[in-house]
């Protein structure tokens, strides 16, 4: 008897094991799901209908190795084999490796690692042994079903194989698996059998897989249905515009979520940092990349528990108290910190105790923000047992947009956790809110505060990610710009209440979904458009507005010659020199700002390479952009300023990048990889790198011969002009504090005051 396998299948299993019958090919065909990245597209589709517990199938293990093996050692094992070995080629087939990756064992192992299973067995000779393994081409293609949610994968044909099934049947796995081990031969197999009736053409989903993929699949689908509104007024469906449109239900969910977060005090970053023991060090900078780090969680959990005890004993309140968040209950805020900032799971009982609004919880679940693990059942089903565990699939980050007096003025941003992503996830993650983002927010807001009378009406955020830069700037405009009819805007969504435009340009469609929702979360849905596109191919005519007041960008900026930086996400890869995307940003900004009658501004952040000559390159990129836009012979006085912190040598920078990318790698492999990266940087001409900003101030667009446009993009009476031959530029390179991003974002005197003064003194 094999534990866990139905009694009626035991004799059939014994027969197949004795004869080594691997007949899964008679029941399954290979399929593809193109919504995943390469390496995660394979699935299985049933060839025939199968009744519950009618058959059982053996799956061989393609590769087994010691349970103490780490990814670097696995690469070493593969490297010792002959290149193009049968094992390597079968692994590449399972992982759908692309042709240009044929020489990259690191990518192969990273994609393979999430599919790894583990088991232990006892032997007389060696005692207890641990084994890691990857299943063969069939076993590796089984998909794990999302708890109470569909996979979003359909068969190649048009028919719906789950049509007519109940919701529980549709959302439950079709198969179950178990590990079978023969101690005599020391061979292990994985066996699969139908746990319910399965129809022909159905995706082969399975529970109890050795590799848990439910969380990965759920993260892929976060907000995927946020642009679908199935109940509109008058019974008409909402028409989707270019770039997508957030649904009314998602807007309602976002507003409901913001109301709860504000009532719980989640908007006060200093207070959150104080509860975590970080206020003295970080001030108003919330280090979300540290707070969600599994290696630091225990310390933060201990700190939160101690803070709760102190607050309860002193009987003081962090909130004024509302119907959503009772006065004096600090456990609500500390729960939100654990759940939404640290990413810790919660029991169903804890979730309902600290977020008692069941409507809100159901809204969050409906748009895919929660991963529910355990017994099925809605949140309001009293019969569900409290074995259900719930995790937040997104990190919710409060970002201050007010001054030190108005601590509660903040933007809320949904992003992926900093530790999420990589080739093993099967999708490009949304960039977390890091020190570069927070530094640029602080620098931009400081300039807006100094220029209150010139609050921008048209804002373009390029490489927007979750939308943090543009959303923060537009919220700041609401504070310092024209009157904001808040009640009317929030109740009706009327654009007339706040006649401004926020355009978010982003390459990653998944990040664009987050940006859509974040705009609504901050009551900016009526003035925000999200455009999915590549900055190096998009032209100003492709965007909703022809002219802008400010352009903001935190582009991918890490130099990556010869693809020599391991585990680099799309949002970090700046191309060979680190400037390939930034060049496109500057050129697009030249088109977007050159028609502004009052002058426009560009704000960017990044790792600045060869910073002393950077303004010269920015000038060239700007002129490249004007070839596609308007050039005015009287348009002179363009100001380009590069602000930077400590300059790193190429060797220092290579070590810093690899310390982050390969923190779990042995020292020798780390040093060899860093050396390769340093040599590649030197070969491209990189001499030094520094954290910093590039600010460009565009002069007013004037001249009788020039075509004139006002800030609304309306053309006034004037004749077109011909191209110019030269533009006069003012260039400066200014050294600031070493940790320039952090100093600005922390908002602590005197460093931040002096740094902000130097950043803004030229923009009055």
Image: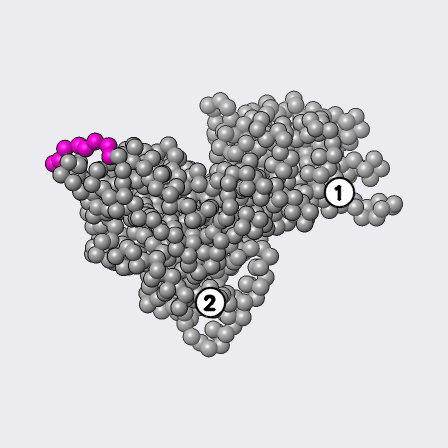
Residue with the most extreme left position:
717
In this picture, residue 23 sits left or right of residue 341: right
For the residue labelled by badge 2, is the local secondary structure a helix, a strand or a loop?
Answer: helix
Q: Position of residue 669 (x, y in %)?
A: 67, 45
Q: Tell me if residue 160 comes above or below residue 277 in the rendering.
A: above
In this picture, residue 123 sits left or right of residue 190: right
Pick the residue in front: 704 or 428. Answer: 704
**Which of marks 2 and 1 precedes in the sequence?**
1
In this picture, residue 433 sits left or right of residue 254: right
For the question of whether residue 405 can be seen, the reply is yes
Residue at (37, 32) in percent of width and height: 537
User: Where is mark 2, residue-wise?
Assistant: 279
User: Where is mark 1, residue-wise?
Assistant: 66
* Image quadrant occupied by the N terminus: top right
Tell me if residue 447 is in the magenta stretch. no
Q: Position of residue 421 (x, y in %)?
A: 53, 44
Pick the residue in front: 142 or 294. Answer: 294
Badge 2, how many Cα within 10 Å: few under 14, some, many 20+?
A: some
The rendered magenta stretch, by its main secondary structure, is classed as loop
Pick the residue in front: 624 or 420. Answer: 624
Residue at (63, 38) in percent of width and height: 106
Tell me if residue 723 is in the magenta stretch. yes
Q: CA distance from mark 1 to mark 2?
A: 45 Å
Which segment is the magenta one? Answer: 712-724
| Total marks in image | 2
For the residue labelled by badge 1, is the local secondary structure a helix, a strand or a loop?
Answer: strand
Residue at (81, 46) in percent of width and height: 122
Q: Say which of marks 1 and 2 sits in front.
A: 2
Pick the residue in front: 422 or 595. Answer: 595
Q: Position of residue 743 (x, y in %)?
A: 43, 61
């Amino acid at each position: 008897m094999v534990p866990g396998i139905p009694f009626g299948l035991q004799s059939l299993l014994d027969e197949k094991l004795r004869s080594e019958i691997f007949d899964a090919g008679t029941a399954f065909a290979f399929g593809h799901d193109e919504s995943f990245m390469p390496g995660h597209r394979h699935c299985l589709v049933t060839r025939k209908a199968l009744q519950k517990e009618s058959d059982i199938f053996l799956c061989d293990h393609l590769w087994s190795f010691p349970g103490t093996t780490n990814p670097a050692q696995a690469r070493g094992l593969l490297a010792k084999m002959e290149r193009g070995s049968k094992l390597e080629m079968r692994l590449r087939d399972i992982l759908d490796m692309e042709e240009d990756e044929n020489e990259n064992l690191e990518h192969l192992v990273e994609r393979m690692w999430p599919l790894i299973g583990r088991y232990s067995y006892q032997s007389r000779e060696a005692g207890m042994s641990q084994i890691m393994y990857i299943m063969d081409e069939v076993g590796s293609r089984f998909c794990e079903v999302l708890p109470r949610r569909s996979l979003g994968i359909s068969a190649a044909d048009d028919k719906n194989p789950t049509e007519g099934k109940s919701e529980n049947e549709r959302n439950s796995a079709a198969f179950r698996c178990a590990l079978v081990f023969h101690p005599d031969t020391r061979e292990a197999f994985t066996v699969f059998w139908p746990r319910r009736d399965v129809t022909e053409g159905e995706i082969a989903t399975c529970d109890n897989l050795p590799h848990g993929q439910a969380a990965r699949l759920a993260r892929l689908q976060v907000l995927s249905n946020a642009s679908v509104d199935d109940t509109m007024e008058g019974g008409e469906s909402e028409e989707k515009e270019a770039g997508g449109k957030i649904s009314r239900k998602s807007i309602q969910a976002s507003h409901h979520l913001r109301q709860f977060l504000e009532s719980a005090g989640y908007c006060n970053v200093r207070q959150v940092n104080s509860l975590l023991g970080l206020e003295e060090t970080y001030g108003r900078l919330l280090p979300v990349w540290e707070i969600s780090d599994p290696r630091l969680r225990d310390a933060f959990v201990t700190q939160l528990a101690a803070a709760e005890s102190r607050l309860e004993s002193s009987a003081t309140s962090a909130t004024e108290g509302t119907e959503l968040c009772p006065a004096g209950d600090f456990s609500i805020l500390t729960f939100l910190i654990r759940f939404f900032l640290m990413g810790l799971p919660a029991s169903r009982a804890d979730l309902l105790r600290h977020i008692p609004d069941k409507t809100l919880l159901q809204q969050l679940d409906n748009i895919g923000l929660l991963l529910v693990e355990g017994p099925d059942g809605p949140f309001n089903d009293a019969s569900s047992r409290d074995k259900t565990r719930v995790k937040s699939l997104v990190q919710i980050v409060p970002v201050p947009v007010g001054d030190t007096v108005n601590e509660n003025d903040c933007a809320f941003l949904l992003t992926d956790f900093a530790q999420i992503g990589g080739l093993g996830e099967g999708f490009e993650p949304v960039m977390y809110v890091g020190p570069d983002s927070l530094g640029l927010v602080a620098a931009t807001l400081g300039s807006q505060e100094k220029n209150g009378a010139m609050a921008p009406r048209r804002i373009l955020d390029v490489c927007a990610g979750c939308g943090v830069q543009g959303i923060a700037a537009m919220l700041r405009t609401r504070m310092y710009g024209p009157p904001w009819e808040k009640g009317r805007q929030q109740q009706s969504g009327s654009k007339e209440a706040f006649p401004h435009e926020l355009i978010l340009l982003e390459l990653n469609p998944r990040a664009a979904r987050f940006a859509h929702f974040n705009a609504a979360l901050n009551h900016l849905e009526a003035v925000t458009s999200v455009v999915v596109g590549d900055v190096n191919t998009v032209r100003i005519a492709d965007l909703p507005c022809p002219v802008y007041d400010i352009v903001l960008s935190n582009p991918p900026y890490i130099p990556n010659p010869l693809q020599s930086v391991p585990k680099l996400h799309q949002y970090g890869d700046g191309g060979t020199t680190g400037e390939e995307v930034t060049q496109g940003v500057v050129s697009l900004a030249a088109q977007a700002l050159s028609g502004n009658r009052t002058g426009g501004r560009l704000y960017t952040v990044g790792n600045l390479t060869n910073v002393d000559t950077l303004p010269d390159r920015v000038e060239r990129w700007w002129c490249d952009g004007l070839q596609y836009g308007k050039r005015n012979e009287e348009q002179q006085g363009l100001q380009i300023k590069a602000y930077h912190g400590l300059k790193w040598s190429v060797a220092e920078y290579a070590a810093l990048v690899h310390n982050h990318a390969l923190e779990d790698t042995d020292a020798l492999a780390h040093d060899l990889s860093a050396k390769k990266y340093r040599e590649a940087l030197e070969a491209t001409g990189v001499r030094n790198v520094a954290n910093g900003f590039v600010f460009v101030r565009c002069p007013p667009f004037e001249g009788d011969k020039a075509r004139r446009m006002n800030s609304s993009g309306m053309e006034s009476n004037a004749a077109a002009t011909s191209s110019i031959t030269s533009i006069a530029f003012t260039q400066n390179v200014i050294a600031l504090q070493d940790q320039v991003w952090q100093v600005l974002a922390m908002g602590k005197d005197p460093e931040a005051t002096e740094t902000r003064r130097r950043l803004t003194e030229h923009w009055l």
